[in-house]
Image (cartoon, rainbow, N blue to C red):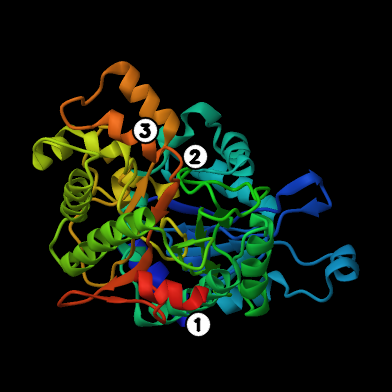
Amino acid sequence: MPSAQCHSERRVRLQAQMKGGLLLLLGNAESPMNYGDNAYAFRQDSSFLYFTGVNRPGCAVVMDLEEDRTILFADDPTVDDLVWTGPQPTARDLAREAGIPETATVSALGEVLRKAKALGRPVHFLPPYRAEHRILLQDLLGLPIAGQAAAASIPFIQAVTELRIRKSADEVVEIERAVNVSVDMHLAAIAMARPGMTEAEIAARVTQIAQAAGCSLSYPVIATVHGEVLHNHHYHHELQAGQLFLLDAGAESPGGYAGDLTSTFPVDRTFTARQRDIHNLVLKAFLAAVDALKPGVPYRDVHLMACRTLAAGMKELGLMKGDVDEAVAAGAHALFFPCGLGHLMGLDVHDMENLGEVWVGYQGKPKSTQFGLKSLRLARPLEEGFVLTVEPGIYFMPGLMDRWRGEGRFLEFIDYDALEAWKDFGGLRIEEDFLVTATGSRRLGRPKPRTVEEIEALRS
């Protein structure tokens, strides 16, 4: 885990990029499921965790740039806390572990912010994504909830992004720990799936593996025979012979770093001929994208190259037609691949997404509005130290096919008659995690099966 000195150095670098005022970092609070004392598992805000390491609910930090002061706002444990949660560190203990010299109670935060506002000093804050933060900003700074996202500090967003986006060696170690546990989750699922099982059984098994390894989940498990639904979190279907099973699941390390992997495999012991064709096409796009990863290459270009590879393969299968480059430029391929090739990963599985993709993934440049391309979260040139996912896929969505056909869309590029026989196929994607190095990239964590032969060997 990062030391007090590490967190102090991160804050020094952060403050050096800002010109004046107060920097406000709000930690997360407990989030009740259905009443106050029955809360979801606590997850600290990632930027708060990155700059402080404090993993207690209900804390805040203010960095006063002119006065060179950093204050942790945290309350000491009460007698009730002792009874219900056991001995907990005091506010001063937390501050010492974070390398923060001053503490104050949470109730004192309002006075500090109101004083700064009265003096006309800027209070920089990051875009809020939790209700309690929106209410605090309304109460303490008088900002209407509807206008808070626009009022968030762009210089603060840019400074945090600049510091968090390149992963240190220690962070990579923590990410690889999460990825290795994620690999174990996928190996178990590939080996255990059988006709007659439910999706819930597999989801439960991979969750158990993460927890037994001292980790949590970096996002809700996707375990489904309906892989054409990109984020399918229902587990009530029974596995049937002839289907594909898609598992998108990752562990989160004790330090909060994510793994994110996807495997698609047959419910039967072997792939059918159609399943093999689509798997090999997706693998071809995956390997081409991985080979293209290196500093200076815009990830948008890698995405579009993968799209052209997928479109060319769909043309060979008789499902697309016409000029491949023109089809991809028009967005016709998005019928089968309506999402982005991948995303940054770190303390968040979609790293810093709460700060805004325009700043994190696009360096302030506008995103495309084209269906499919608009969902690409990362477009900027790659740099050494970036950690990202590569996850091409092919999805046969009957509802989308029928809509586009009814609207007469891309008739010059899509053979809708041929597609009728594929409506029951489902979806297939391959996803792994990579670190951009000085000369290219390297896969993070232990290998998991990629090829048809490797997957079928586990299914036997």
Q: Is residue 81 left or right of residue 29?
A: right
Measure how far apart labels 2 and 1 are at the Cα level.
Answer: 33 Å
Q: Position of residue 217 (x, y in %)?
A: 59, 64
Find disc 2 in the rendering and name its residue: 117
Amino acid identity at mark 2 = Lys
Residue name at image x 51 percent, y 68 percent? 269
Residue 120 point in image, percent of width and height:
43, 38
Number of marks in the rendered image? 3
Mark 2 or mark 3: which comes first in sequence?
A: 2
Residue 343 visible within the image: no
The first of marks 3 and 1 along the sequence is: 1
Circle 2 residues within 10 Å: few <14, some 14–19, many ≥20: some
* Mark 3 lies on residue: 420
450 to the left or right of 84: left
Residue type beneath disc 1: Ser
Camera-side residue: 72 or 49? 49
Residue at 19% from the left image edge and 66% from the top image edge: 293
Mark 2 or mark 1, whichever is nearer to me: 1
Find numbered disc 3 in the image and state the secondary structure of the residue it sits on: helix
Amino acid under disc 3: Glu
- In the rendered view, tell whether residue 177 sits above or below residue 199: below
Image coords of residue 227 (percent x, y): 48, 49
Tell which tag, 2 or 3, sits nearer the viewer: 3
Residue count near mark 3 (Cα–Cα under 10 Å), binned few <14, some 14–19, many ≥20: few
Within the image, what quadrant is residue 34 found in? top right
Q: Is residue 412 visible?
A: yes
Contact? badges 2 and 3 (CB < 8 Å): no
- Res 3 label: 1
In the rendered image of this protein, does residue 252 appear above or below residue 147? below
